[in-house]
Image (tube, rainbow, N blue to C red):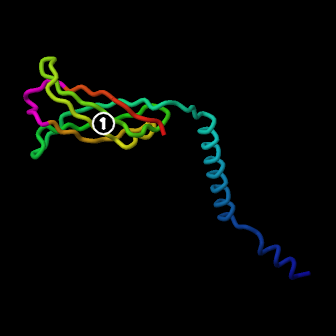
Amino acid sequence: MEKKDKQNSNDQKNWLEWLVFGVSLFLLVGILGYLLYQTIQHKPGEPDIYAEAMADPSELAPNRYLVSIFNKGGATAEEVVIEFKLYKSGAEKEKSELSVAFVPKDSESKGWITFSGKLETTDSVATRVISYKKP
């Protein structure tokens, strides 16, 4: 009979084991709750793509522009093609395109384009998303 009493007393958990168990259980329930919430709140949508270009000249590429591509929609866009036009006094001076493999939903991607003309001969740049597809 004494052996049984000794085994039962050795099976008792100390406060640290209970603390680790409680924290682990709390984290597990929290993660499952978050995933359930995200599943319920998810609304499938379409990609919503737009782009911005800012002059970003360098020593070797004085006509370089930094391009930020944004997808504020609810789906990833693939094979994104964006057109850029340089203007001087309302007249188009030069045109360029940038292709991006994919832009995930609710994200921003960056790229660069370079024009051959001089930056001083232009006063604005216009961006337009030509095409993309939904995977």
Query: Which quadrant would residue 22 be assigned to in this image?
Result: bottom right
Q: Nearer the viewer, residue 36 or 13?
A: 36
Badge 1: residue crowd in 10 Å (few <14, some 14–19, many ≥20): some
**In the rendered image, which residue does mark 1 sit on?**
68
Identity of the residue drawn at 42% across and 40% down: 78
Location of the N terminus (image quadrant) = bottom right
Is 117 covered by the magenta stretch? yes
Where in the figure is residue 9, as x and y percent of width and height?
Answer: 80, 73
Quick one: which residue is furthest to the right in this view?
A: 1
Identity of the residue drawn at 31% across and 33% down: 82
Where in the figure is residue 68, as x and y percent of width and height?
Answer: 30, 36
Q: Nearer the viewer, residue 19 or 56?
A: 56
Where in the figure is residue 21, as x and y percent of width and height?
Answer: 67, 59
Q: Is residue 133 left or right of residue 40?
A: left
Type of amino acid under label 1 = Ser
| Highlighted range, magenta | 116-124
Where in the figure is residue 4, as x and y percent of width and height?
Answer: 87, 78
110 is higher (above) or lower (below) than 51:
below
Q: Nearer the viewer, residue 134 or 65?
A: 134
Query: Which quadrant would residue 98 be assigned to in this image?
Result: top left
